[in-house]
Amino acid sequence: MREESRVREEVMSRKKIRILVAKPGLDGHDRGAKVVCRALRDAGMEVIYTGLRRTPEEIVNAAVQEDADLIGLSILSGAHPILFPKIMKLLKEKGAEDIPVIAGGIIPEKDIPKMKKVGIREIFLPGTSTQDIVKWIQDHIPGVKKK
Amino acid sequence: MGEKTPKASNSKPSFKNWKKKKYATNAEADVCLPKKVFTTVSGKKIKEIYTPADIADFDYLRDLNFPGAYPFTRGIHPTMYRGRLWTMRQFSGFGTAEDTNKRYKYLLSHGQTGLSVAFHLPTLMGMDSDHPLAKGEIGKCGVAIDSLVDMEILFKGIPLDKITTSMTINAPAAVLWAMYIAVAEKKGISPKVISGTIQNDILKEYIAQKTFIFPPRPSMKLIVDTFEYGAKEVPRWNTISISGYHIREAGATAVQELAFTLRDGIEYVEWALERGLKLDDFAPRLSFFFNSHNDFFEEIAKFRAARRIWAEVMKDRYGAKNQRSWWLRFHTQTSGVSLMAQQPYNNIVRVAIQALAAVLGGTQSLHTNSLDETYALPSEEAVTIALRTQQIIAYESGVANSIDPLGGAYFVEALTREMEKEAKDYIKKIDDMGGMVKAIELGFPQREIADSAYWYQRAVDKKEKIIVGVNAFEMKHEPIPILCIDDAVARQQLARLREVRRSRSQAKVKQSLEDLKKAAADDQNLMPFFLRCVKTYATLGEIMDALKEIFGEYQESIMF
């Protein structure tokens, strides 16, 4: 009992996890991104959604300006081999490489090792339950950024 | 321990007694006809059995009539598939125009009967391949078309007077259509004889697919321009394919797909009448495009209800006199979003069931998805299986022998009616908002769809809806071979674009673009101007950029 209330207290004192959900690429398939946004919000997180067709520069700037704890990328157009490394490179240039990046969408399995190598922490493929994404975030993202 | 035989009963046959008769005790009845609610993939409640009581006031001639007769519930043609099978039309395009031209010839040589062009995303967005946002996208989701040169290569050696071509293009549809007309003219084929379809349905872009460029009002103007031009100059062309497909894929229920699509159709009719076009001149060229999802009977009922509602709208609401204006002709594509990455060979079965529903629903043409499309554009082997699926339905299953074979079934008729009613309620709601453009500006259909998508995902997460191989019956599977677009495609395309820009007359291009802008500002019909532009080899991006100066660009309000 004591352990449980201690954990609860810690959760209460945290600020909400702040997530930037972004859609790079030219495709307009935003069903998945929007469903994930809602699920994260329902799980008590703060979600900022960029809207469609954002350039790597726009995404990185938004993440820095919004002080995001995490970036979630959704792409279904097949342009991830070009766009993901670009985003990771820009994050580094801005000194924001400590913001973890996860991704979802249509990403062929053979591309996954390459994407992880450039620094994408996790890739959620079609069929993933929203609860699995929520759990991953809770397990990997500390609630409070040390100021 | 032996099985309990149901208790005999002397009571009269009735629904109530049927339930009692079969099951001796309440406990047993609970097991056998569980109180649990059964729903379609759209969340629509389905009863355990349908009887004559569910269609009590059914009137054959009023509600169904014969195929080819109002309200066309059983089909728009008197002979349906006995006269001619549906068109087997696989949506296809990838890489460069040369790559896709080869695939077209392959499909035509294997019994496909019409072409359907998939453009890559930069083309769909009206951008040239050298646009900064095109980086990484060239040839990926479809074929790269920047100028008339690409279009000439795409249709090289294909008889445009003998086949019909459907082009999935929306915001820049009028320009791509102008390119097609120009290619036909260069081959010595009159625009009067070419036939096919441009999707040209911008409303569903704002609602669902999101490849929009201009704001709704100038976009609607462009579409009415194509209606007006087509009716006079390209009379066998379907100038629009009013599409529910993408609305469904974005998460809509079957009823929402039905309702929003038909209300979009009404919106186009309203705008065309506003321009002063005569209803019976353009209405026969309106065509539709629906999704066929997993829930077999719900889909069949949707197609039947669609025909009935549209016939009534055209005849009673608008007073169309030409019977062809009453017809809802439609293309169907099986549901992309229903395909699963897990155990991908199962997708063949899903596609077969969905295709069967489309055929039993009386579709005019059909695209069957390939098993590998959750990963990439289809490989040649996968697309062949998809085409063969249609051929097996057509030639082996026997379902095409009799017209609307499910007509009269209590369940199917009751479901058709229910969906008709629910769709009409939505249509009325949107009428009351002041029409679809208004409803889109208010975010109404977008919100309804997002809500449905979220409801469905939650149902899957909670295993209230089972997806085989995903949240049940899971297992490891071997990776399947998938089509990869070589980086060489982008290099080739960019080189060709540079060559086009270098070799054309810049003065002519500039003049044609200036004329276009002036005509747009003066609110003239822009089709003749597009034709002039493409013939000077102005690129798609240049043409759309010129129009953006006059029309502006659409900014979507962000919501989830």
Image (spheres, coloured by chain):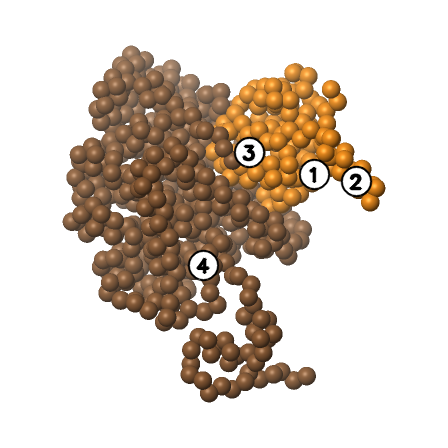
Chain colours: A orange, B brown
**First-in-chain label (3 vs 1):** 3
Instruction: Single out the mark in the foreground, 4 or 2.
Output: 2
Q: Are marks 4 and 1 on the same chain?
A: no
Describe the element under mark 1 as helix, strand or loop. helix
Quadrant in the picture for the N terminus of chain B: bottom right
Q: Which residue is mark 3?
A: A75
Disc 4, disc 1: CB below 8 Å?
A: no
Asked if B57 appears above or below B115 in the picture, the reply is: below
Numbered mark located on residue B423 in the image = none
**First-in-chain label (3 vs 2):** 2
**First-in-chain label (1 vs 2):** 2
Describe the element under mark 4 as helix, strand or loop. helix
Residue at 25% over, 49% down = B313
**Disc 2 crowd, CA 10 A, few/some/many (<14, 14-19, 20+):** few
Residue at 21% over, 24% down = B524
Q: Is residue A26 left or right of residue A131?
A: left
Q: Is residue B393 left or right of residue B179?
A: right
Q: Nearer the viewer, residue B467 or B154?
A: B467
Instruction: Single out the mark in the foreground, 1 or 2.
Output: 2
Dot 1 amino acid type: Trp
Residue at 48% over, 25% down = B134
Dot 3 amino acid type: Ile
- Asked where in the image residue B155 lies, by quadrant, the reply is top left
Q: Which residue is mark 1?
A: A136
- Asked where in the image residue A103 lies, by quadrant, the reply is top right
Calculate the distance from the C-alpha at mark 4 to the C-alpha at mark 3. 30 Å
Disc 4, disc 2: CB below 8 Å?
A: no
Calculate the distance from the C-alpha at mark 4 to the C-alpha at mark 1. 36 Å
Q: Which residue is mark 2?
A: A5
Instruction: Single out the mark in the foreground, 4 or 1.
Output: 1
Instruction: Single out the mark in the foreground, 3 or 2.
Output: 2
Numbered mark located on residue B296 in the image = 4
